[in-house]
Image: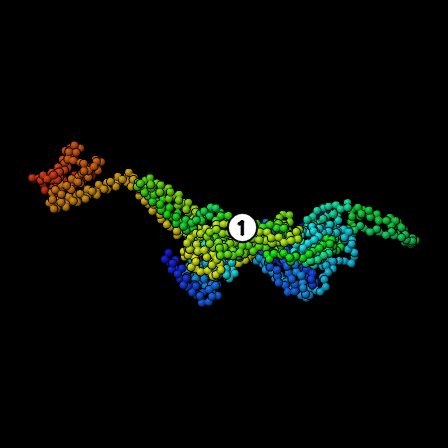
């Protein structure tokens, strides 16, 4: 948590300080500079939020939505990020399928929180099992072992369910999906910038994506997965 | 641009527009690129997929007005793709070159179009370009055109359905040279059906193929007179074979053996197969390019009255109703909420517009988006849904004000304003401390965002969730391994064989400790300690052999169970008891003797056990 505090503090002093030099710059942070900040400091919800807003201001809803989505992964309960993500989608004329009741219920906790809960439940289950084996308060130990095991299993299932799909991706630039993975293939549908898609296959310079009810091949450069290991280069 | 129509084989596909290589977006100027000042032309912009209508292009030398849109779907290799066509009325205002720029629609751009505008009215293209020298009336005898309109009194901007019927007599093959179009510059035609509906009918006792197009007609300016419709076509049919002239009898040449009429005119000038040709209708094929004309009769188009025109009037003409969908749930501060306002009715929905809820300190409102769902019967009837995202910025009760919509009702010839019912909702405080700032959402929208507003979340080296990171699974893995180890230890501890070995070890260690103490006591000449240690060693060993508690074994037990063989052990125990209870021995053997005795007894007992 200390590292987090330090990083936020550095953001408050570093990024806006440069922007204060001119009001125009303050209104529109440079996305490239923010991308560089991410590359050096790692994923940060504050920088990602700034990046999304910068791209949205510059008229690039695709990278903006991608940045907001990533910021939301790190700060899932932040209403500002949620509102700006919805606004950017609304402005771009995009919609997102509503979450199922199960997802909405499990979404009370994040995937990471469910994971830690599962580990805690696992520790309880192991403790109960060992105590039972060593004949220490066997009734309590048995209860702990069973409850911990069940709770841990359910928490792991919830963590997997809530976790963002590694196949989730955003269309960075408006592009035409094709029925085959080559540029001269017949157009399948027009993928608008910022649309959320699922990557199902990779082949050469193309990826096979699916949105709500359509599927087709898009150039790999036009699509970026939301869940990434390391910050990528600027998208413009 | 040729379409084919035949009664003998009704080829619906022939009526369809050619499926040649299509660009994703394309623009077409109808009836062509030769225009005249003041004569409206139709600019059709078509794109694959659903796309909002592009704004009317700015064309130097012409006025452009959105006239309507049409949607259809097409299927390629099983993939169904929607297609949208947007129509614009283009009225040239000066002669010369007219350049229509590339139009961005959806994700694509159309090709620019170059047209030429002349002062004189452009002649109808089909008639002027293709009408042959022979009389077109022969064509009209085999085909004719009619037009149906629901009303003869219209107002500018009103949209009414129009039905154009083309009739082709049996045995006539028709190739369409273009779509039906208007001859008047006071109207625009939009949403023209791509494929006419076809039906076989009988008129005056003869079979006909009736092809019917449906479209929307919109008056562009006040006028009075007839509305003309034209359809350029090429007809093909077999004419009845002309009668063959009879040959005049020739004089007989006495020197020519074949000059006899038998050889020159065996059937006396008559064609013996003429009846056969007539029977199979195999007369010569006739092709005829012509333009079918139709007129609607007198129409009166009046302008919209200025008196009583509401400020919010956007040009909607028809009959409409407006309603706000109920707002479900309890929104929180900062959470986006979608309002849905539905306008239902009949009229020119392309001119139906709503701005939605205004931005207020309690509610941040975004621009509305609209989606029109026509009814199955007509594109003039349906529901246009306006959705608007709003973000409450303060907790408490919030009232969505009544939203007004003004239109012109041609049946009443008056403007009508309808309103939604005001809606009420309760806004809860935002979840989370940092996000509960009421001014957060609008501030984030109106100004450049600041990292200070993003208070939650942690910085990480990767966005991959923990559950999908292999290193995280080392924790439960290690935990399970440790648990298995501890459970195994418990099992091992409880095993009888292991327990026996452990017990034997414990006895051995206890005996060894006692023997060591005995040796130390012997070195120190401490008889009491010596015999106490010797007794402990012997009792431990006997207890392990007899499976009894060592401290409970007495000299009497030794005598009872070992008899004379245990005399030495009994002697050691008696001496130890005596010394323990304060009865020093008067005379006794040296401790080395007893040490040898005890060691021997211990070795004997260990061997025996």
Residue A209 drawn at (x, y percent)? 52, 53
Q: Quadrant of the N terminus of chain B?
A: bottom right
Q: Is residue B589 above or below residue B134?
A: above
Tag count: 1
Asked whether residue B74 appears in the rendered view, the answer is no
A172 left or right, relative to B417: left
Q: Secondary structure at mark 1?
A: loop
Residue placed at 84% from the left, 49% from the top? B271
Asked whether residue B170 appears in the rendered view, the answer is yes
Quadrant assignment, res B301: bottom right
Chain letter of the residue beneath label 1 in the structure image: B
Residue A100 drawn at (x, y percent)? 49, 47
Determine the residue located farthest toward the right in the rendered image: B254
> Which of B531/B23 is in front?
B23
Residue placed at 57% from the left, 55% from the top? B354
Which colour scheme appears in the figure? Answer: rainbow
Residue placed at 24% from the left, 40% from the top? B503
> Which of B136/B344 is in front?
B344
Residue placed at 52% from the left, 54% from the top? B389
Q: Is residue B422 above or below residue B91?
A: above
> Which of B275/A25 is in front?
A25
> Which of B228/B497 is in front?
B228
Q: Quadrant of the C terminus of chain B?
A: top left
Determine the residue located farthest toward the left in the rendered image: B586
Residue A184 drawn at (x, y percent)? 58, 57
Which residue bears the numbered disc 1?
B422
Label 1 Cα neighbours within 10 Å, binned few <14 / some 14-19 / many ≥20: few
Determine the residue located farthest toward the bottom in the rendered image: A21
Residue B394 drawn at (x, y percent)? 46, 54
């Amino acid at each position: 948590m200390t590292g987090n505090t330090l990083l936020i503090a550095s953001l408050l002093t570093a990024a806006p300080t440069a922007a204060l030099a001119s009001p125009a710059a303050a209104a529109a942070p440079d996305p490239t500079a923010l991308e560089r900040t991410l590359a050096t400091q790692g994923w940060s919800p504050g920088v990602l939020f700034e990046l999304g807003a910068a791209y949205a201001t510059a008229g690039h809803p695709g990278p903006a939505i991608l940045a907001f989505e990533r910021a939301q992964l790190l700060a899932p309960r932040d209403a500002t990020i949620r509102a700006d993500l919805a606004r950017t989608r609304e402005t771009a004329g995009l919609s997102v399928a509503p979450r199922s009741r199960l997802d909405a219920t499990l979404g009370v906790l994040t995937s990471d929180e469910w994971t830690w809960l599962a580990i805690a439940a696992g520790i309880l289950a192991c403790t109960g099992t060992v105590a039972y084996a060593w004949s220490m308060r066997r009734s309590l130990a048995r209860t702990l072992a069973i409850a911990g095991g069940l709770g841990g299993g359910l928490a792991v299932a919830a963590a997997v369910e809530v976790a963002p799909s590694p196949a989730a991706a955003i269309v960075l630039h408006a592009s035409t999906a094709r029925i085959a993975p080559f540029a001269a293939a017949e157009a399948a549908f027009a993928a608008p910038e910022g649309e959320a898609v699922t990557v199902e296959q990779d082949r050469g310079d193309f990826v096979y994506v699916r949105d709500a009810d359509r599927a087709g091949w898009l150039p790999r450069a036009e699509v970026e997965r939301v869940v990434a290991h390391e910050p990528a280069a600027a998208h413009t | 641009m040729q379409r084919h129509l035949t009664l003998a084989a009704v080829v619906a596909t022939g009526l369809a527009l050619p499926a040649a290589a299509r660009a994703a977006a394309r623009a077409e100027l109808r009836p062509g690129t030769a225009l005249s000042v003041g004569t409206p032309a139709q600019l059709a912009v078509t794109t694959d997929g659903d796309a909002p209508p592009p704004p009317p292009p700015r064309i130097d030398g012409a006025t452009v007005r959105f006239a309507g849109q049409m949607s259809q779907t097409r299927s390629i290799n099983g993939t169904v793709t929607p297609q949208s066509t947007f129509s614009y009325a283009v009225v040239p205002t000066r002669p010369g070159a007219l350049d229509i720029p590339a139009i961005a629609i959806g994700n694509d751009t159309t090709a620019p179009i170059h047209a030429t505008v002349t002062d004189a009215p452009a002649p109808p293209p089909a008639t002027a370009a293709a009408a042959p020298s022979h009389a077109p009336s022969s064509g009209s005898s085999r085909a004719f055109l009619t037009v149906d309109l629901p009303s003869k009194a219209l107002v500018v901007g009103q949209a009414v359905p129009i039905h154009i019927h083309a009739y082709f007599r049996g045995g006539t093959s028709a190739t369409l040279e273009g779509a039906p179009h208007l001859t008047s510059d006071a109207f625009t035609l939009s949403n023209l059906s791509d494929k006419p509906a076809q039906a076989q009918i009988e008129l005056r006792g003869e079979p006909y193929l009736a092809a019917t197009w449906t479209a929307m007609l919109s008056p562009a300016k006040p006028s009075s007179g007839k509305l003309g419709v034209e359809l350029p076509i090429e007809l093909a049919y077999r004419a009845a074979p002309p009668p063959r002239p009879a040959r005049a009898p020739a004089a007989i040449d006495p020197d020519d053996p074949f000059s006899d009429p038998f050889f020159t005119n065996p059937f006396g000038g008559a064609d013996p197969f003429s009846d056969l040709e007539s029977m199979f209708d195999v007369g010569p094929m006739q092709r005829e390019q012509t333009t079918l004309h139709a007129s609607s009769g007198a129409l009166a188009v009046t302008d919209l009255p200025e008196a009583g025109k509401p400020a919010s009037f956007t040009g909607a003409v028809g009959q409409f109703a407006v309603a706000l969908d109920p707002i479900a749930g309890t929104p929180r501060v900062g959470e986006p909420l979608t309002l849905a306002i539905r306008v239902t009715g009949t009229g020119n929905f392309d001119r139906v517009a709503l701005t939605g809820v205004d931005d207020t300190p309690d509610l941040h409102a975004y621009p509305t988006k609209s989606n029109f769902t026509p009814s199955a019967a007509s594109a003039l009837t349906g529901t246009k849904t306006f959705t608007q995202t709003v973000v409450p910025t303060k907790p408490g009760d919030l009232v969505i004000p009544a939203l007004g919509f003004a239109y012109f009702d041609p049946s009443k010839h008056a403007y009508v304003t309808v309103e939604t019912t005001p809606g009420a909702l309760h806004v809860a405080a935002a979840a989370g401390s940092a996000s509960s700032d009421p001014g957060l959402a609008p501030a984030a929208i109106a100004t450049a965002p600041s990292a200070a507003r993003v208070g939650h979340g942690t910085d990480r080296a990767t966005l991959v969730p923990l559950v999908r990171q292999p290193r995280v699974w080392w924790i439960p893995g290690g935990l399970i391994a440790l648990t298995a180890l501890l459970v195994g230890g418990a099992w091992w501890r409880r095993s009888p064989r292991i327990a026996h070995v452990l017990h034997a070890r414990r006895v051995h260690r206890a005996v060894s400790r006692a023997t060591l103490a005995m040796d130390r006591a012997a070195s120190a000449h401490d008889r009491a300690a010596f015999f106490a240690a010797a007794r402990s060693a012997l009792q431990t060993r006997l207890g392990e052999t007899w499976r009894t508690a060592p401290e409970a074994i007495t000299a009497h037990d030794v005598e009872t169970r070992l008899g004379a063989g245990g005399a030495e052990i009994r002697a050691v125990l008696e001496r130890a008891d005596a010394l323990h209870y304060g009865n020093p021995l008067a005379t006794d053997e040296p401790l080395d003797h007893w040490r040898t005795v005890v060691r021997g007894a211990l070795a004997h007992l260990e061997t025996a056990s």
